[in-house]
Image: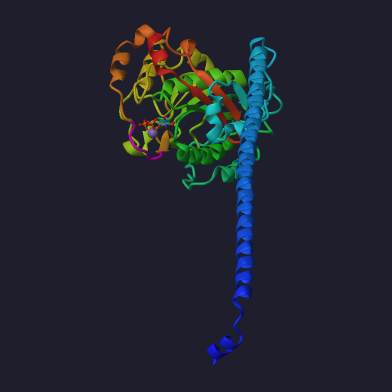
Amino acid sequence: MAIAASAQNKLPTSRLKGILERLGRHTESSAKKRGACCEMLGRARTGFVILTATTVVFCYFVLQHTQVLHLQQRRCHIQERNKSLQSGTCNNTVVETTTETKRGTRDCCTNCDMYVGVRPSCITRNFTGPWCQVIRQKRGYAKVKVDLASRSLEMLEKLHGADLDPGGLYRPRDCTSSQRVGIIVPFRERSLHLKVFLNNIHPFLKKQRIEYMIIVVEQAPGSRLNRGMLRNIGVIEGEKLCKFDCYFFHDVDMIPLSNLNIYTCGSKPRHHAAALARWNYVLPYQHIFGGVVSFTTELFKKVNGYSNMYFGWGGEDDDLYNRVRYHNMDIERYPMKISRYGDLKHHKSVAQNSRYSYLKTWKARVEVDGLNSLKYNRHLVEFRKLYTWIYVGINEQEVLISI
Ligand code: UDP
Ligand code: MN
């Protein structure tokens, strides 16, 4: 039926030819149109790519320029500051910035010399009331409640920071402390210990009604840890901040266990950390002088501080003991029960054999190697809520060849 119908509707050949011709022309023109369209699209794509590339290059130059401006501003600021520091007019300058201290940006401070945060107000210290009474207890050892929980720094700041001045400075408000004590902590990569230390040392010291400041001296990477030098630096930098009567040199992993272990200085250098859990609370040898020791500022200066020659673990404490004896001084200790400390666990540091040769020649170096011959780069001093942070660089080769 369908074939029959198509046969009935058959078109004449001439008309069919016409239709086909028109159809051909139409296809040709749409192909042309399509070609033109594609060409346009292609041009648009190239245009878009060129535009994007130009925008990227433009943005890059703008960013570079901004950064260069920022760096120039910074350099200017530091130069100005150094100039005024040299001329002695800038002692109390306060540089308010917080961005410098974030971990990732520390490196940019390699050659800076900056104080960050509000400087603690300990320059003037007058007698303003009754002397603070130190704890007096005849019997027992007034056990400290140690808290070994791991807490965030923010939490610790909330717990202990309310009555502290910037830089971890504490001053009893209702009485005058007989001494101002700088607690110097050599430090590198022991942040868990530092948090436990801060959590315990602040309540311990506040209870003793002592004016004190916690000073953490951190050595930048690049050379072996020099504990003696960091302690010396703590004193030299501490003296620029406040007038301290007494210094404690305190390992970050030592937690005092008796409230009768009073943190003021006596007339002799004192060895505090004499009874450690790891030694079953028995003194290993008579002249041991590490962990926690205290000196009046005057006596520490007299012995010329620690030797700067001991890189890596060991030696600097025994050297210091020799210096004390050389100056005809004795050391003293509280009774063993009072000298108890909890020592936080860590991997044993690698002992350095080089310490033996320096220990043999200690006497020749007393006068020329110590507080009076320190060489270091002070990168940053930052007054944090719970402590003052002093970040320094030490060039081991330079120090070792200097003597
Ligand atoms: N220290 C540090 N990071 C180290 C090694 C030592 O901060 O990697 C500091 C810290 O204050 C520590 C002190 O130096 O308590 C004494 O070092 P260490 O604890 O290794 O000595 P040891 O316990 O063997 O006497
Ligand atoms: Mn230790």
Q: Is residue 25 visible?
A: yes
Total marks in image: 0
Locate the C terminus and report the quarter of the image it occupies. top left
Residue 154 higher or lower than 98, as above or below: below
Q: Say left or right for 232 vs 355.
A: right
- Toward which corner of the image does residue 379 lie, by quadrant? top right
Prevailing secondary structure class for the magenta stretch in the rendered image: loop
The residue lying furthest to the bottom in this view is 1
Q: Position of residue 358 (x, y in %)?
A: 32, 14
Residue 137 on image: x %, y %: 51, 37
Residue 399 versus residue 348 in the image, above or below: above
Nearer to me, 239 or 207: 239
Instruction: Please provide the residue range marked out in magenta.
Output: 343-349
Where is residue 329 drawn, in percent x and y?
A: 42, 14
Residue at image position (58%, 32%) is 101
Instruction: Tell me if residue 132 can be seen.
Output: no
- Side of 19 where 285 appears, left or right: left
Look at the image and say whether residue 268 sits in the magenta stretch: no
Task: Please state which of residues 61 and 247 is positioned toward the viewer in this rendering.
Answer: 61
Please tell me whether residue 209 is drawn above or below residue 370 in the rendered image. Answer: below
Question: Image point 55% across, 29% down: which residue?
Answer: 389
The quarter of the image that holds ligand 2 is: top left
Asked whether residue 345 is drawn in magenta, I would say yes
